[in-house]
Image (cartoon, rainbow, N blue to C red):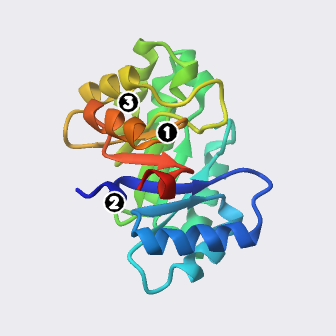
Amino acid sequence: MKLNKLIDQTILKPDATPEQIIKLCKEAKQFDFMAVCVNPAYVPLASSSLKGSDVKVCTVIGFPLGMNLTKTKVEEAILAVKEGADEIDMVINIGLLKAGNDTYVEKEVREIKKAVGREIVLKVILETCLLTDDEIVRGCHAAKNGGADFVKTSTGFSTAGASVAVVKLMRQTVGETMGVKASGGIRTGEDLRKMVAAGANRIGTSSGTKII
């Protein structure tokens, strides 16, 4: 796959303006990225800005803490799809995974996937910087068993982003039938290539234009 089609060009900062979203979409079309990733409030704007292109609209659910009720995440995801989202990046309930309640995490993933349908790509954000290796493995299994399409390393809003070691662990855990998205701190072409070599097949970054 071409490098540009690995990239979800991202703006998730709370002070992002409509003008910045329009610029993001214009650059995404110019460089033919896989997707833009924006907060839910900007899904309609991104969808209209990307009309006629093959660049997907990705948004985030339960972001950035993951501590919303499952039914809130489900409704948020359904509304995002109605507004034009093609892909959903949801944050798990990190505390419940750490407490050993893998069943809750798996059930939540399953409910969101069922709600949005098979055509919508669902990525599950584990926030790996807050997890042990064992918890990462368990989170990956919960996401896979719940029917997710990808596991994702990070929100970019916690204590650290993606690492080569974690991406390798995630790829080893989910196998080749599921996607791995590396996100957080990926700013150069060298960063991207290291993540791809470790097993990532999607990259979340705000530096896509610089990288390409």
Looking at the image, residue 10 sits to the left or right of residue 107; the answer is right
Say which residue appears at 22% left-offset and 56% top-offset: 1
Residue located beneath label 3 in the image: 140
Residue located beneath label 1 in the image: 186
Residue located beneath label 2 in the image: 5
Say which residue appears at 39% left-offset and 69% top-offset: 32
Provide residue 95's location: percent of width, then percent of height.
62, 22
Q: Is the residue marked by circle 2 packed among few (<14), some (14-19), or many (20+) residues within 10 Å?
A: some
Say which residue appears at 64% left-offset and 74% top-offset: 22
Closer to the eye: label 3 or 1 = 1
Per the model, the C-alpha gap separating discs 3 and 1 is 21 Å
**Can residue 145 be seen at all in this image of the molecule?**
no
| Element class at badge 3 | helix
Most distant residue in the bottom direction: 52
Provide residue 211's location: percent of width, then percent of height.
44, 50
Q: Is the residue marked by circle 1 packed among few (<14), some (14-19), or many (20+) residues within 10 Å?
A: many
| Rendered-image quadrant of the C terminus | bottom left
